[in-house]
């Protein structure tokens, strides 16, 4: 993924535009796209400075976190419930999520769902 351009460069482009250069000329001078120069100028006019937005991070887990208590109830009531069954129950509640989203929810909260009890290790042969 590409990195954001530096704040110093953004400030110099905006200063050049404020100094009388056109957005196109300023973009050519500093080697950035014209659309970036225009956008940075608009941001500077609206907010005082053309600051880059935050990059990365999780933007979608809020939907499943809102259903966290309900999911925990389902697992507590029925310990052997599958992800597909949980997904179906969430769809009934008008909260559709994918299987991968459910899996990441369980991993994030450390919820494990082992269906059979652990067995004692064999002394004579390795077990799988």
Image (cartoon, rainbow, N blue to C red):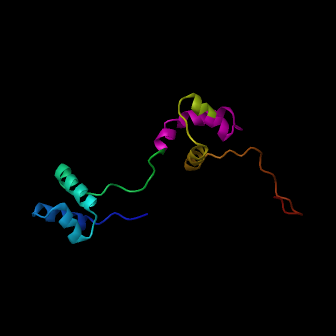
Q: Quadrant of the C terminus?
A: bottom right
**Rendered residue at 61%/44% (across/down):** 99
Judging depth in this view, the residue of 38 and 24 nearest the camera is 24
Task: Name the image quarter holding residue 120.
Answer: bottom right
The residue furthest right is 124
**Rendered residue at 53%/30% (across/down):** 94
Residue 63 is left or right of residue 87, and the answer is left
The residue furthest left is 20
Q: Is residue 82 magenta?
A: yes
Residue 65 is left or right of residue 121, and the answer is left
**Rendered residue at 20%/63% (across/down):** 24
Q: Is residue 7 visible?
A: yes
Judging depth in this view, the residue of 56 and 44 nearest the camera is 44
Q: Quadrant of the N terminus?
A: bottom left
- Residue 104 pos. (x, y %): 57, 48
Q: Is residue 121 magenta?
A: no
- Residue 8 pos. (x, y %): 23, 67
- Residue 119 pos. (x, y %): 81, 51
> Magenta-highlighted stretch: main secondary structure?
helix
- Residue 36 pos. (x, y %): 27, 60
Residue 4 is left or right of residue 21, and the answer is right
Residue 61 is left or right of residue 87, and the answer is left
Highlighted range, magenta? 61-87
- Count of numbered circles in the view: 0
Judging depth in this view, the residue of 52 and 106 nearest the camera is 52
């Amino acid at each position: 993924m590409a990195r954001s351009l530096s704040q110093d460069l953004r400030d110099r482009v905006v200063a050049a535009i404020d100094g009388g250069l056109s957005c196109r000329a300023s973009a050519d001078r500093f080697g950035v796209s014209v659309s970036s120069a225009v956008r940075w100028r608009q941001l500077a006019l609206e907010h005082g400075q053309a600051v880059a937005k935050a990059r990365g991070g999780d933007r979608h887990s809020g939907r499943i976190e809102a259903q966290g208590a309900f999911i925990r109830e389902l697992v507590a009531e029925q310990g052997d419930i599958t992800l597909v069954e949980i997904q179906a129950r969430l769809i009934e509640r008008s909260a559709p999520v994918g299987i991968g989203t459910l899996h990441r929810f369980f991993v994030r909260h450390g919820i494990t769902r082992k269906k059979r009890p652990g067995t004692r290790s064999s002394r004579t042969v390795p077990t799988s």
